[in-house]
Image (cartoon, rainbow, N blue to C red):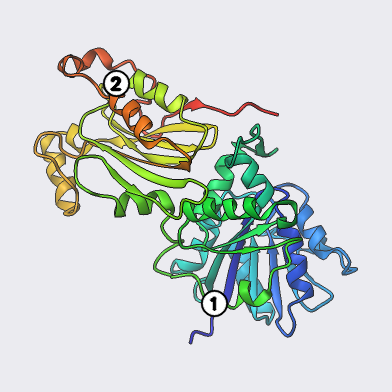
Amino acid sequence: MTDRIPVTVLSGSLGAGKTTLLNHLLGSAGDRDIAVLVNDMGDVNVDAELVAEGSEVDVAGGVTELSNGCICCELQDDLESAVVRLADDREFDHLVVESSGISEPAPVARLFTTESRVAAKYRVNGLVTVVDSRLLVDTFGGDGTPERVAAEEDDRPLSDLLVEQIEVSNAVVLNKADLCADAELDEAEELVAALQPDADVVRTSFSEVDPSWLLDVERFDEGEVGDLPGWKRALEEDDHGEDGHGHRHPDEVYGVSSFTYRARRPFHPERVAEVLRTLPEGVVRSKGTLWVAGNEFRQTVGQAGESVRVTARGPWIASLPEVEQDLYRSNRPNLEWDAEHGDRRTEFVVIGTDVDEAALRERLDDALVTDDEWADVEELADGPFGTEDAAEVVLRAPEPR
């Protein structure tokens, strides 16, 4: 058994209940000595003030002793320096890091898993996301509600933030359960299971989580920063050949299911862009790589709720000179290579509630180039997708409230 200090990395959107959870842990820790690092991206660390509230101490100094013997660090210093300093200066049983202002806990977790002076002192035991159950259901379930921005300093849609935080977690706290009916909570669990099949889920009100469930269960494999999200799992498990009909259906009490669309024929840029702009309302998450005619860059789709973004992620290997192709292929022996098209292909995962799979597949099929269009593919070069590495195109954005 390692003597490194266990670390729980905590994330959650604004108002989900992270600070309430931290205060609950501090008040119910029992014999545990917990260090809490509150990472706020703003000039004033509001969360640190709230965690220390009632302790009659001033957090302005950075690292502060709380009333129950726990420690709150305002992270005025670099995160790496702060956690090393904590381990050197204090004795405690467990570290909880709130990754406030960060879209997902994985970047923080990597600090503790790479070969560094931090990893020599700490080990990650869990990536935990606190979710506002009511907000999750309203955003993705039923008829949905208008989108919101995650926070003032973060102009991404709220749906992006919710999905990314759940996908990387291995434990999800469905908070504010008292505001939802049992059927809505069941639906929320189905949504979480579709986005991250391996996550442990607990329903709570006022973030009253059993500290043992949160702190004592080892959920993190240091070989992986988070388990495979649902969309990536679908790509690996649903490879049934080139017919493009791989699909995975979890318990469909609430119609939550997923399927994978594959094709070795390119999309017409305008037609596939229109499909992505008009995805059915029930599509919670879709992600994958598209082969678009007239464009030598792999186009990576990232959709969550009303937000649809497509990013160019480097050229297809098959588009490079033959010498470079051979070099890349020699370094990637498991690369799937087609004799005619090389690595060019579409792999697109769709996760949603009550999505008409057959209808959406038909729309995607209709967006593929015809034989005549393929024969004159240069005419399609002026499509809406990026032609430089990392170029991003927003095909659909939520209406602001």
23 left or right of 284 in image: right
Q: Amino acid at mark 1?
A: Lys
Inter-mark Cα distance, 2 to 1: 53 Å
- Label 1 crowd (10 A; few <14 / some 14-19 / many >=20): some
Residue 78 visible from this viewpoint: no
* 2 and 1 marks in contact (CB < 8 Å): no
**Quarter the C terminus occupies:** top right
Task: Give the answer, above or below, for where 168 lies relative to 97.
Answer: above
- Position in image of residue 199 (x %, y %): 51, 62
Q: Could you tell me which secondary element the residue under label 1 belongs to?
A: loop
- Position in image of residue 193 (x %, y %): 49, 56
Please tell me which residue lies in front, 6 or 230: 230
Task: Give the answer, above or below, for where 198 lies relative to 229.
Answer: below
Q: Earlier in the sequence, mark 2 or mark 1?
A: 1
27 left or right of 335 in image: right
Q: Quadrant of residue 360?
A: top left
The residue to which callout 1 is attached is 121
Q: Amino acid at mark 2?
A: His
The residue to which callout 2 is attached is 268
198 left or right of 265 in image: right
The residue most toward the left is 339
Residue 62: give its label. none
**Viewer-side label of 2, 1:** 2
Instruction: Write the residue at 37% across / 54% down.
Output: 233
Instruction: Write the residue at 41% across / 57% down.
Output: 228
Residue 282 visible from this viewpoint: yes
Number of numbered tags placed on the structure image:
2
Instruction: Write the residue at 11% across / 36% down.
Output: 322
Q: Quadrant of residue 205?
A: bottom right
Task: Give the answer, above or below, for where 2 lies relative to 352.
Answer: below
139 left or right of 251 in image: right
